[in-house]
Structure formats: C-alpha cells, structure tokens
Image: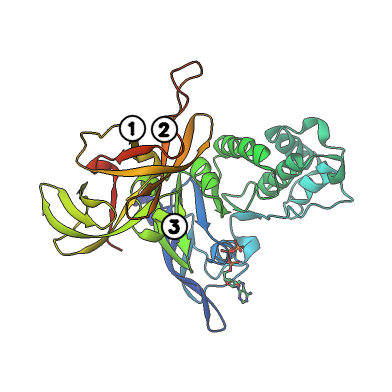
Amino acid sequence: APVAEAAAGAPFVRVEGVSKKFGTFLAVDDVSFDIARGEIFSLLGGSGCGKTTLLRMLAGFEEPTKGRIHIDGRDVTDVPPYERPVNMMFQSYALFPHMSVEKNIAYGLKHEPLSRGERADRVAEMLELVQLQDYGGRKPHQISGGQRQRVALARALARAPKLLLLDEPLAALDKKLREHTQFELMSIQEQTGVTFIVVTHDQEEAMTLSSRMAVMEKGRIRQIGTATDIYEYPQNRFVADFIGSINLFEGQVRAVSGGVAQVEVEELGQVSVTAEGEVAAGQPVTLALRPEKLSLSRTEPEAQNRVAGTVESLAYFGKDSLYRIRLASGRVVSANAPNARRGGEGQWVADWEDDVWLSFAPSSAILLVE
Ligand code: ATP
C-alpha cells in the first residue's frame, strides 16, 4: 500500500483517531491530523495537555490505546521505535558529559552500518550543519547552552531520520538566545528537508517556527492552522484566549444581514461585527477583540463601534504602548496604540486619567459561538 498512498498524495504523517489512556485517565483524546513532508509542525498547549504523550506515541515509546499512526506511507502503530524513520531530541539533550562533541554526535550513528571513514564524514557534515566545526574535541561542559542544543540537534539528525521529534527544544535557553535559535532551527530544517514536529508551550515560538500548529487542551486538539489562521481566525474561546492577549465580551446576536451581525454587548452597547460563520438572531456569542485592533482617540470618532472610557494605566513598549481603559460599566479593556516618533508631537496618544474613545471596524472583531 505505501506506493498507492504516495501516488494519491498521501500526507507524510497521518495521525488517525489516536487516544491514550493511563489507567482511567485520558491523556490524549481522539486526536487526528495530517502533516506534509518538510513541515515544521508544532504541538502547542499548556502543561499536561498531552503534547509529550502524543510525541512519544509518534516516536513509538508509548502505544496508543486507540487509533493508528502512519509515517511516510506506512502504518507504524505496531512498529518499534528503532524501526521507525524517526528520531527524537529530548528537552534535556541527554548528552554524555564524558564524551567529546564528536563522540556524542557519532553515538547517534551507533546502529548504522557505516565504515569508520563514512562515520567520520557524517560527523564532520553534522558539525558543519550546526556550525560547530571547531568544537568537535570539546566536552559538553566546555561549550555554551546554545552550542549544547546544537550538538543534540546534530546527534538527532546524524542518522538522517525522515521525521525529527523535538520536545521543548529551546526551553533551556534564555529568551534572546531562544529567539536566535528559532531561526537557526528553521534554517537547518530547510537545509536537511527533514520534517519536524515540535512540542512547545510557548505560543510565540510556535508562531515563529511552524508552518502549522495544533493547539491542544485537555488531550484534544482545539484548532489546527497556520499562525495567521490561529491568531486572526480562532475557532473557539480557548484558542482566542490562549494565543496572544485578547478582550472577551459576552453578547447576544440581535440581527444578521449582509454578512454583518448586530450584537448586543452590555459593556459596549450594540456593535456591528462581520459574521464569517453561521450566526443567527438570538444566539449567545463571545465577542473577541485584540488590543491592537482597537483604535484609541481623544475625540469622539465617526466609527459606529465606539465606546468611551478613561485611561487607567499605560505601559510604554517602545513602538507602542499598552493602555488599560476603564469603561463606564467598570470593565477594563486592553488597547495597544502606536507611539509618536522621537521628536514628534506628544509621545502618547493619551495619558493617565484622560477621557478617551475606543473604536473598532466590524471586520476587526471576532465572533465566537463556542
Ligand atoms: P508538559 O508541558 O507539562 O510536559 P504535556 O502537555 O507534555 O505537559 P503530557 O506529558 O503529555 O503533557 O501528559 C499529559 C497528561 O498525562 C498529564 O496529566 C500527565 O500527568 C499524564 N501522564 C503522562 N504520562 C503518564 C504516565 N506514564 N502515567 C500516568 N499518567 C501520565
């Protein structure tokens, strides 16, 4: 069947209705998704949502209670880890402290039928891939955290897996190094063409790295998509709230016409919102507004969707400031507004305790029915 599947354009990885129970606890609950060859696919979610368990089932360290896993056109559900075209890079890196960088990388090849020369060539190639040509003779304690991370990556890639599973690959690095290393990982993925599946709890990391991501909650996938899909078109309240910051309001649809819903929200009055999915009059909905989609002004705007408030606090972030605006109802809303250029008139749009207006376009709000 592998050939037929490939001919039909089968995905490179197919996870089909996979569940995992530990005793009576359902750690992974009926998860399905496809990954194309060459993707960097992230499993994103909070602690305990089942990301690592799912990764371990892909590696073969854990057996699904239900469902099938296909990799590269082959059903590997019952195939042991070492016979899968898969390797895993652990969060702890698991480098041998007494071995040199070279020996650590060569260890990844221990089961490969290679001559001495071939092995040395492969190690040299891997050192070059992660730009550690001059560090082969050092021990792990003689290199930096970022370099250790690259050694672990080189070792995991040495035997040329088709699929590399990375469990929180950047968690041990500080913020600055992590951002830099994200681009390095992407470049190495591109050079090797290996498909990556990355477990992370860091949404910015998932958004930067991934071609697509699955957002998980309590063992289930709540949405799969590109960074843009997930950020701009969250499908439910959980995803909207998990990714980025957002203001959520409870409301009820009054009427729908011409793709625009009139929504009654206690704190905002009646607002009009572009309705993408199916919404009907009378339906309870959640209105979601990203802070950067709100416009802030000192004078009353023309916009139909507008509400008055008072600046309760503001925080300067360089290119913009984050305002906390208290509405008449007492509800506090977050809004980002750009800062004036250096030397421009007035640094801020508004200052503490100023009376201001917030407004937004119908297409800037997200309507959630779940
Ligand atoms: P984290 O980011 O904290 O590592 P995670 O999303 O990777 O979280 P998992 O490690 O997959 O979460 O665990 C999912 C759930 O399954 C957790 O509630 C965990 O306690 C439970 N679990 C994991 N492994 C086992 C096991 N071997 N036996 C029993 N329960 C387990």
The answer to which of 135 and 10 lies nearer the viewer is: 135
Residue at (38% x, 51% y) in the render: 247
Residue at (53% x, 34% y) in the render: 317
Query: Which of pointers 3 and 2 lies earlier in the amino acid sequence?
Result: 3
Q: Which residue is mark 2?
A: 350
Q: Amino acid at mark 2?
A: Ala
Residue at (61% x, 38% y) in the render: 179
Dividing the image into four quarters, tell me where ligand 1 lies. bottom right
Can you see residue 74?
Answer: no
Q: Which residue is mark 3?
A: 2
- Quadrant location of the C terminus? bottom left
Q: Confirm or deny contact between disc 2 and disc 1 (CB under 8 A).
A: yes
Residue at (15% x, 64% y) in the render: 282
Q: Which residue is mark 1?
A: 298
Separation of disc 3 and disc 2 at Cα?
63 Å
Q: State the image coordinates of residue 180 (x, y, percent, origin top left).
A: 63, 35
Task: Tell me the quarter of the picture where residue 331 sits.
Answer: bottom left
Relative to 112, residue 32 above or below: below
- Quadrant location of the N terminus? bottom left
Left-right relation of 351 to 159: left
Task: Tell me the quarter of the picture where residue 256 sits.
Answer: bottom left
Q: Amino acid at mark 1?
A: Arg
Q: Residues within 10 Å of mark 1 (few under 14, many from 20)?
A: some
Query: Which of pointers 1 and 3 lies earlier in the amino acid sequence?
Result: 3
Query: Which of pointers 2 and 1 lies earlier in the amino acid sequence?
Result: 1
Separation of disc 2 and disc 1 at Cα?
7 Å
The answer to which of 243 and 307 lies nearer the viewer is: 307
Q: State the image coordinates of residue 217 (x, y, percent, origin top left).
A: 47, 64
Colour scheme employed for the rendering of this structure: rainbow
Q: Is mark 3 within 8 Å of ligand 1?
A: no
Separation of disc 1 and disc 3 at Cα?
64 Å
Q: Residues within 10 Å of mark 3 (few under 14, many from 20)?
A: few
